[in-house]
Image: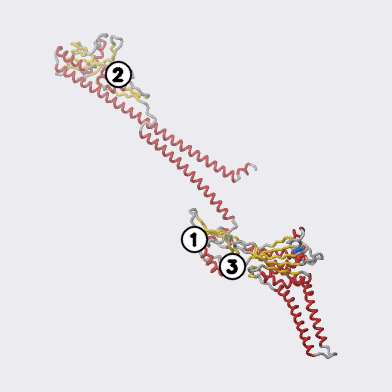
Amino acid sequence: MNMPMLASHPLIQRLTLIWSLRDRRLSLWAALVGLVAAVLITLVWLAGRYEASQVQSTLERDTSDAVNDIRSGLMRDVQALQALQANHNSTQTWSLGAGSLLREHRDWLRMEWRDAQMQLLTHMDSPLRAPSFGRTPRSNALNEITQACQKARRSNGPAYSASYFVPQENGLGFEVMDLCLPWVVAGETLGYSITSYSLQEIMAEHLSPVFARRNEVSFTEPDGARLAIIGQRGRGVRLFSAHQLLDLPGLTLMLRVDGRRGAPDLFPNVLTALVTAMSIALVSVLVLLVKDSRRRLRAERDLAEALAFRKAMEDSLVTGLRARDLQGRITYVNPAFCQMVGFEAAELLGRNNPMPYWPPEMVGEYQQRQAIRLAGNAPPREGYESVFMRKDGTHISVLIIEAPLINVLGQQTGWMSAFLDITEQRRVEELSRASQERLQATARLATVGEMASLLSHELNQPLAAIASYANGSLNLLQPPEPHDTAHTLADLRLALQRIAEQAGRAGKVINSVHDFVRRRDQDREAVMPQALVDAIMPLVQLQARKLGVRVMIQLDKGLPAVWCDRTMVEQVLLNLARNGMQAMDAPDCTLRNLYIQARRAASNRQHQWVELSVTDLGCGISEDVAAQLFNPFFTTKAEGMGLGLSLCRTVVEQHGGHLEFEPHAPRGTVFRFTLPVQPTAH
Ligand code: ADP
C-alpha cells in the first residue's frame, strides 16, 4: 500500500481525526491551565501591590501628620517665646522665664536675647544638657542668626535660620537651627530673642515614640543630605519611604521617613485567598465535569455501538421477529418479518387483531389462537406452523416459535415471536411426497405384475376345477344311456354348485388383487393390527401356496389399534412377507415357515408403540447385502426392482416408527417395524 492510499484508508483517517481532536483538547486544557495560573498570579501581584500602596499611603499620611505635629509644636514654642517677651522686660526676669522654658523644652539648646544691633544682652543654655556651644564660638553662627533676624524683622514675625552643624566635645555634633523672634514695641524693634533648636531633639520632642520606633525619621536638605536622624528603620524586607516638606518662615526642611515592612504574603489578604480558593474549586469542578462528560460520552458510545450491533444483527437476520404487548398489539417487527409478509413496519406497528397478514378465511381460527395465547397459555416450545398472507395475496407457510417477553424486572411485558418462512420447504416436501406416492404406486403395480403369474397359477386350480365340473356336467347331459333323471339332476346341481364355488374363489382372488391396487386412502386412521394382517393374507397366501410356505400369524391378545396410513402399512407388511418367502425359495430350505407377529413395544409416556415383525427361516442376509439393503434399486433378484425395502423404511419413518432387521437363529431373518398406537385424544 503506498502512502497516499494509506492516508486515505478509513482507519487512518479516523485515527488522524482522533489525534487531531486529542491535540485540540490538550491545547485547550493547556490554555485553560495557563489562563487560570495567569489570573492567579495577576491577582496575587495586584493584591501585593495594593497592600504595598496601602503601606505607602499610610506612611505618607503618618509623615504628613508628623510634619504637622512638628509645625504646631514650633508654633506653640513661638507663642511661649512671645509670652516671655511680653512679661519679662528686664534681663533678670527674662532669665527666670527662659530657664523654666528651657527646662520644659528638651529640643531647645540655648536662648539669647539680643538688642536691635544683634548685640547679646543675655543668654541661657539648656539646663538639661551640657552647653552646646562651648567648643565653637557663637560668632560662627552669627551670620545665619542675623539673616534670620532680618527676615523676622521684615515679616514682623518669627523666622528660622538655615541649619548648621555644631561640633561637640566628644567628637560628635549635631545640626542646629535658630529661631529669631523680634521684640517689637509700638512698631519699634527693640531686640530679638533667639532660640537654638537641635533638629534631632525637635523630632524626639514632637513625634510619638511609637512612630519613631517603627521608622527612621530624618530631616534632609533638598539635595538629600541628612541633617538629623532618629529611630530605626524597623525589620522587614521592603523599604518604604515618604517625604514631606516642613515649610517654616525662612527655612524649608524635608522630613523623610523610612520604614521597613514585611513583603506582602503570597496570599496577602482574605480576598485573594478567597478568589484563589474559588478558582481552585472552579477548576476542580471543571475537571470533574470534564471527567463526567467523558465517562458519559464513553457510555454513550458503548451504548451506540451496542445498539448499532443489535440493529445490524436484527437487520441481517433471516428470521422474522415480532414483539407484541400483553394486549396483542405489535410493538416491534424486524426487516425480515416485513419482507416475509410484504408490509412496511409502519403498517404493522400498533396493529392488533385481525392482523393484516392473516388470510381472511383463517381470521376466526387465529383470533381464537391469540385469545388462548393472551390468556397466558405458553405455546409449544418447538413452535407451530401457520399460514400467513402476503400483501399481494399469496400465502406463505411459517413456523412460529413464540415465547413470553420478560423485562429486566422479571415481569412479562408481552410476547416475542420468531418466524421462519417454510413455504419452500413445504413445497419441496409436497413434491417429494407426490413423487414418493408415484413411486409407491409404481412399486405396487410392479408387485401386481409379479403377482400376475401367481394369479394365473392360483386361478388355474379353480378354472381347472370349473372346467372339469363343466365337462362332467356335459357328460351327464349326454343322452346314449338312460339315467335316473333325478340322480342326474342332483349330480348336475352339485357340479354347478362347485362351479359357482370355484368361480367365486377365482373372483375373490382377483378382487383381492384389485382391492390392493385400487385402494388409496391417504389419511391416517385407527386400524387393528389384525385387520392389517387380514388384508394382506389373501395375497400372501397366493405366494405361500406356490412356494410351499406355511404362514403363521401370532398376534398378542388385546393389542390396541395403530394410527397409520392403512394402505401403506399393508404394503410394508406384504413386501416383508414376500421378501421372507422368496428368501426361503431355495432347494436347501426344507422348513419353510413364515411368522407374522405383532406385540406391544417399549413405550414412553407420550407415545405407545406396537411392533410388527416378519420372520423367515430363509437364507439370511450377508454383510454385503446388509450394507446396501435400504438403497433404492438394490436387488439380488433377477426380476426384482429393489424398491421394496427403501419404500418400507420411508413409510415406517413417516409414521414416526423405525424399521430394523436382524438374523434369526438358527437361520433366517427378522424384520421389525413399529407403529404408533392410536392416541387417546387428538
Ligand atoms: P426386491 O425384493 O425387489 O429385490 P427389496 O428392496 O425388497 O427389493 O430387497 C432388496 C434385497 O434385499 C433383495 O434383493 C434381497 O437380496 C434382500 N432381502 C430382502 N429381504 C430379505 C430376507 N428376508 N432374507 C434375505 N434377503 C433379503
On screen, residue 194 versus residue 489, left or right, reads left
User: CA–CA distance between discs 2 and 1?
Assistant: 102 Å
Count residues near mark 2 (Cα–Cα under 10 Å), then give few for <14, some for 14-19, many for 20+.
Answer: some
Q: Quadrant of residue 482?
A: bottom right
Q: Secondary structure at mark 3?
A: loop
User: CA–CA distance between discs 2 and 3?
Assistant: 131 Å
Residue 422 in picture, x, y percent from top left: 62, 62
Judge whether 7 appears above or below 199 on screen.
Answer: below
Is residue 633 among what the camera can see?
Answer: no
| Relative depth, front residue between 253 and 41 | 41
Q: Quadrant of residue 551?
A: bottom right
Residue 57 in picture, x, y percent from top left: 32, 28
Q: What amino acid does circle 2 point to?
A: Ile
Residue 53 in picture, x, y percent from top left: 34, 29
| Relative depth, front residue between 16 and 165 | 16
Judge whether 150 appears above or below 599 on screen.
Answer: above
Q: What amino acid does circle 3 point to?
A: Thr
Q: What colour scheme was applied to this rendering of the protein? A: secondary structure
Count residues near mark 3 (Cα–Cα under 10 Å), then give few for <14, some for 14-19, many for 20+.
Answer: few
Q: Quadrant of residue 550?
A: bottom right
Answer with mark 3 or mark 1, whichever residue precedes in sequence: 1
On screen, residue 240 versus residue 562, left or right, reads left
Q: Which residue is mark 2?
A: 230
Q: Nearer the viewer, mark 2 or mark 3?
A: 3
Q: Secondary structure at mark 2?
A: strand
Quick check: is the Cβ at mark 3 less than 8 Å away from ligand 1?
no
Residue 31 in picture, x, y percent from top left: 47, 37
Answer with mark 2 or mark 1, whichever residue precedes in sequence: 2
Q: Which residue is mark 1?
A: 326
